[in-house]
Amino acid sequence: MKKKWLTGLMIVMVFLLTSSLALAGPGKLGGRGSGGWGMGTPYQGMYNPANLETFSGEVIGLEQTVPMKRMNQGIALVVKTETETVTIHLGPSWYMERLDAKIVKGDKVEVKGVRTTLAGKSVVLAAEVKKGDSVLVLRDASGVPVWAGWRR
């Protein structure tokens, strides 16, 4: 009787250990918990630093966005330039919400980023956003996002 009880307890312990490790594993789409926003993900693969452009205009909106399937939520700006309205992806919500720098509707900004197409729509993956004298750096010169080293 005691042997059956001990065997049952061991099975339950193995199940609990295995399930907790599975839940603590990598994020939904790689990048060790990045939620699809980190290095080595399809989203990051669309950023090519050789195609860096600069956009200037007024922020006419802020949006929550999920750029691709299986990615966590992110923050995007909608900026009205002299010639177009551009959606600019800043980064994952979990990172952007912890920053002191705040960008609000009506702000005049200058954005450096890479234009790409997601779900048939043109968007810009931001490298930096300048507002007045302050600069919010989101990626380094080679395109590595600053949140990629968040937990190091």
Image: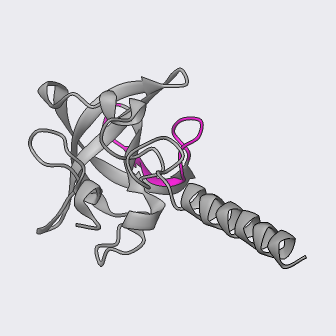
Magenta stretch: includes residue 81: yes
Residue visible at 55% across and 55% down in the picture: 64
Q: Residue furthest right?
A: 1
Task: Say how the picture is coloured.
Answer: one colour
Residue visible at 39% across and 52% down in the picture: 32
Is 12 located above or below residue 56 in the figure?
A: below
The rendered magenta stretch, by its main secondary structure, is classed as loop
Instruction: Find residue 126 and report its horizontal and vertical position in percent.
Output: 28, 45
Q: Is residue 101 left or right of residue 37?
A: left
Does residue 104 appear in the picture of this structure? Answer: no
Does residue 70 appear in the picture of this structure? Answer: yes
Write the start and end of the magenta stretch as one range: 66-83
Image quadrant assignment for residue 134: bottom left
Q: Is residue 28 left or right of residue 83?
A: right
Q: Is residue 91 left or right of residue 111?
A: right
Foreground residue among 46 and 116: 46
Is 133 located above or below residue 51 in the figure?
A: below
| Image quadrant containing the N terminus | bottom right
Foreground residue among 81 and 26: 26
| Image quadrant containing the C terminus | bottom left
Residue visible at 30% across and 41% down in the picture: 39
Instruction: Find residue 101 and report its horizontal and vertical position in percent.
Output: 28, 73
Foreground residue among 18 and 126: 18
Image quadrant assignment for residue 130: bottom left
